[in-house]
Image: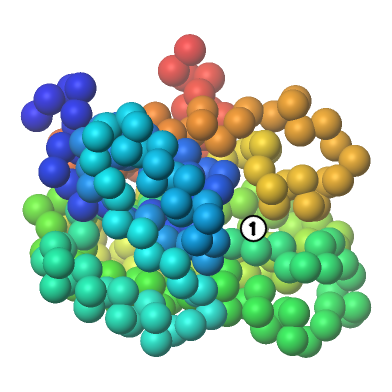
Amino acid sequence: MSDELPLKDRIAVVTGASRGIGYAAALDLARAGAHVVACARTQGGLEELDDEILAATGQRATLVPFDLVDGGAIDRLGGAIFERFGRIDAWIHTAAILGTSGLTPVSHAEPREFAKIEKINFTGVYRLIRSFEPLLRASDAGRVVYVTSSVAHAPKAFWGAYAATKAGAEVMVKCWADEIENTPIRLAVVDPGRMRTRLRAQAYPGEDPMQHPEPAEIGPLMVELCRPDQVPPLDVSFPAWKAKAR
């Protein structure tokens, strides 16, 4: 395996690829040789990513615009990937929402808004696992990266809906990791720490975003976790990995 292209000819799906951590991960996976299936709600963001991948690699990504609240679309995505590629070698999940209301007391959360947060941050993850597991089993070394949040472990006031759904999804993917331990699939749960993302800007509008790392800095870690010749740890802290890499 070439160190220059450690993911050569691998099929990598990135959910939440139109911006932030997902965008950075998709771009670095493509640079490492993977064919990227980029998924997100925002068509424009996906097209921008595709242009940057083409400029960097000479290859196009496969773009799949859809909303995680649409369970049928998730099922169809799995079927379409099977028909075209027959497998998934890596899946990075970064998609999540804070909600249009931002931070709010639990007792003030609007039911419809809460339901949408739950569908995207939690139920959408379950539907993706259900759709993707057979495709990951078809790989010789399936790799899954789930991006979590520190508030899943250290709950804070006003983060109720987001923290609860991220914590629930993290527990669920770890249960799944235990279920598939006798397969070639390996899963890593990554805490990115404070990062210069749109979600963080929504949560802390008065904060100076320049004090935090930009999402591009996490790309090399995502490539490392998706390599078929390495077995990733279950829990990964990006700040700790970054400090060790210096």
Hey, which quadrant is residue 33 in on the image?
A: top left
Residue 62's quadrant in the figure?
bottom left
Q: Which residue is drawn at 65% across and 79% down?
A: 116
Q: Which of 174 and 15 is in front in this view?
A: 15
Residue at the spot 44% in from the left edge and 84% down from the top edge: 71
Q: In this view, does 110 lie above or below 212?
A: below
Q: How many labels does the image show?
A: 1
For residue 54, what is the image quadrant? top left
The amino acid at mark 1 is Ala
Q: In which quarter of the image is the N terminus?
A: top left
x and y percentages locating residue 129 in the rendered image:
35, 72
The residue drawn where x is 76% and y is 33% is 209
Q: In the picture shown, does residue 220 fall above or below 65? A: above
Colour style of the rendered protein structure: rainbow
Q: Position of residue 84 (x, y in %)?
A: 14, 67
Q: Residue at x 30, y 50 (%)?
A: 61
On the question of residue 21 being in view, the answer is yes
Report the residue marked by disc 1.
152
Give coordinates of residue 21: x percent, y percent. Answer: 52, 44
Q: Is 90 in front, or is 82?
A: 82
Q: Dot 1: within a 10 Å radius of its alpha carbon, few (fewer than 14), some, or many (20 or more) residues?
A: many
The answer to whether residue 41 is above or below residue 230 is below
Front residue of this view, candidates 156 and 24 = 24
What element does badge 1 sit on?
A: helix
Check the image and name the residue furthest to the top. Answer: 246
Left or right relative to 211: residue 39 = left
In the image, is 134 to the left or to the right of 12? Answer: left
Q: Where is residue 156 in the image (x, y as percent from the top left)?
A: 80, 56
**Residue 80 drawn above or below residue 136:** below
Is residue 25 at least partly visible in the picture? no
